[in-house]
Structures are given as structure tokens and as C-alpha cells.
Image (spheres, rainbow, N blue to C red):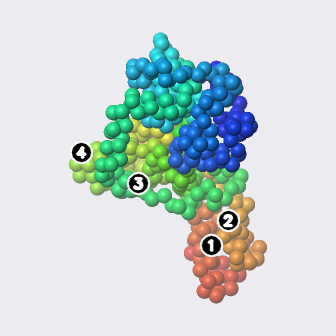
Amino acid sequence: MAELEKVKRKTFADILVSEGIVSQEVMKKALKAQWSEGISIELYLINKGYVNEDTLISVLTKKFPLKFVDLSVIQPDPEAVDHIPYRIAKKYVLIPLRKSGRSLAVVMGNPLNREMAGELKKVTDLKIIPFVGRVSEILDYIQTYYSEEIQKEEEEISAPTAYGKLKGEVGLTLQSNMNFENFELSACNEVAYSFAKSFAETRGVENTRLFIFGKEGYGKTHLLNAVGNYILEHENFRGVLYTDAIKFMDLLNNIKSDKDLKKFRLSHVETDVFLFDDLDLLLGHDYAQNQLLYVLMELHLQEKQFIFTSSVPLKALSGMNKKLISIIETSIASPIEPPDKELKMKILKKKLSNLDLGSDVLDLIQKGAEDNLRILNAIINEVITLSRMGKKIDTSVIKVILKTYR
């Protein structure tokens, strides 16, 4: 697919709109379905009757160096099919056709899908030669050649499962009020925000590992929850497990048998995105570090996504399991700096906008909170509560509140 990558400049969606095949409004619906339902753009457009298969094939073969394969007269080789797992074939609407040496010919509904190219590299080291085929014929062959996997999937869906419950027991509940939209930006946190947003948006293709560090109250937990909430809101095929050092160790302390330990390990590995808060709290807890190492090695081998946060950088965790740190070191490392005056004032003005407080009051609050956003929000909540009780908020009231946090 390297030659195809060189000539790609626009996305498949851009091309269909610019060529007048579909309107911008229809494409917005298709893109929304792609994110929310995990359905490919071409399959959505065909199913909804916005385009027909031959039109899509015509656009792809005229605009790009792609050849059409008529699957009604050419049958895929079962040995070739074995090189691509069902989940990839189903997700991206493709069917392997022939294997020749170190090359694998694959018939696709949309060979321009960049995410698909990244996923294929993860599951095979063969050179992918892309061809265009009719979506309906590809789907028919997927049903035929992956029948055992499809039957197993249907049985798993229909069978009762306790995994949802188990997952809730294992991890922590994501805080719905912590998202990217309400994360206030300033120079002190915009880099970490950008990395976290990219991690959430690229659907496991890029920026698959991230390490965010900064002291308590800088916004690390907010970003971790924002990533989890974004993925769960926009996708239905990637699972998220959010936990922290305290929850992890509490569960380990309750393990009574080897069977329980196996269940504990498995439950932390059976996810697509692993979010772990407060890594530094595992310092001095060797057993917990060893169990986290097992989990992380499995996630690493399966090329799963993960984010770790810590109140200190990795170099300050030298007393921790070296193998554990070596895996985390493969992540993009991003610091969050102490919240500056600009950031604190943004938060104050947004959350206390209805109280019409003077600049002297706001300035006193932001100074009193120092560099801890958790304390800042606690003060804000007290101010709101006192105001609702009829208390006039001035500098003298703020000084009394601040005594609690000093």
C-alpha cells in the first residue's frame, strides 16, 4: 500500500464531496455513524441508498492507481484469508484474495482508509496489495470464509455474561463531568491536553501510549477521564478500563487464591484502552508493581493503548520495578505545569460568573488556591454555597474560607 499512500492527499470523504457524489450534509451523517456505530463510510452510504457500489468503484479506480476485482468471477483463496483476522475484515469491509511470496492481495471497499492501513500492519508483516471490490460481494465472502468466527461472536452476544459487572468492579467509574469541553486551557497545560485529545481521537492508530506527570491538582485526572469519556461517547468497539493505584492495590489485598489472581489479571487485560492514575503511589509496593508489570506486558504484546499519570516524572520513580518503567518509557511523556494565574482566573470567571464578584475577590481566591486546582474548585463550591445562603461574598469572607486550606 506504500505507493497508494504516496498519492493520497484527500480523504475518501473529501473526494466524494468534492466530486459531487454526496453532499456535505450526507457526509457529516456518514462520519457521525463511523464514529458512533463503527460502520465504514462506504457501507453507510450504500446501505442508506446515497450511492451505489459501481459509483464508488468508478471514483476510486479513476482517481487512484487501483484495480477493480470482480468477486463474482474470482473466488478468494482460503489460505490467503487466514492471514487477516475476522475483526479486521468485518470492521473495514475487506477480504484477502491471494498470497504470493511476501505479498497479500486484498479486495477492499475503501482502500483509502488510513486507519485500516495501520491496523493491517499490526496483524501481518506481508506487503498489502490493495484492490477495489463491490461491498456486497466482499460482505458475502466474509460471511462464508469467517463463518466459525461469526457463529462464535453470535453465541457470545446471546450468552449471559458478567464481564460488564466485573469490569465495573475492577476499575473506577469515569466522571462524566470531566471532559475535553470543560477542561480550561492555558500555557501550563495545553501540550498535555493536545496529546490526550490526539490519543482519544486517533482510535488506536497513533499516539497509543502516553505518560502525563505533574503535581496533585494540576488536571491529570481530568484529562484521563476526558479520554475515557470521549472514547465511550464516540465509539462502540473499543473498551476502556479506568483505575488508579489505590483501587489496584485494594483489589490485590482481597485476593485469596491463585484463581482470584488469574481473574484479576485477566480482567485488567481484557480491554482496549487502559487508563491508570497515580502510578507514583505504587512506590514501595513491590507486589503491586509486579502484578501491574504482568498486566502491562500483556497490553504491550497486544499493542493496546494505555495512559499513566504520576505526580513525578519517570526519572523520579527509579525505585520502581525497572521492567515496568522500561515499558512505560515507550510512551510519549508530557508534563503539566503548575496552573498559572490566567488559568485560575478563567475557571473562576466561568464558574462564578453569576455572582458578579469584584476583581479583588477573584484575585484573592486564585492566590489562596496557590497551584492546586482541586483546592480552587473546593473554594468555588464554598463560595457558591454561601452565596445561595444569602451571604455577601467579599474579601473578608474569602479570607475566612482560605484558612481551611492553609
Q: Amino acid at mark 2?
A: Ile
Position of residue 165 measured from the top left corner of the image (x, y, whole percent): 35, 56
Q: Amino acid at mark 1?
A: Ile
Q: Is residue 259 above or below residue 128?
A: below
> Residue beneath label 3, please?
171
Instruction: Choose between 266 and 406: the one closer to the eye.
Output: 266
Inter-mark Cα distance, 4 to 2? 48 Å
Inter-mark Cα distance, 3 to 1? 29 Å
Position of residue 251 measured from the top left corner of the image (x, y, whole percent): 33, 54
Q: Amino acid at mark 4?
A: Asp
Could you tell me which secondary element the residue under label 2 belongs to? Answer: helix
Could you tell me which secondary element the residue under label 3 belongs to? Answer: loop
> Residue beneath label 4, please?
258
Whether residue 215 is visible, yes or no, is no
Point 39% across, 28% down: residue = 145
Q: Earlier in the sequence, mark 1 or mark 2?
A: 2
Q: Are marks 1 and 4 in contact (CB under 8 Å)?
A: no
Position of residue 10 measured from the top left corner of the image (x, y, whole percent): 70, 33
Q: Is residue 346 left or right of residue 378?
A: right
Marks 3 and 1: which is nearer the front? Answer: 3
Q: Amino acid at mark 3?
A: Gly
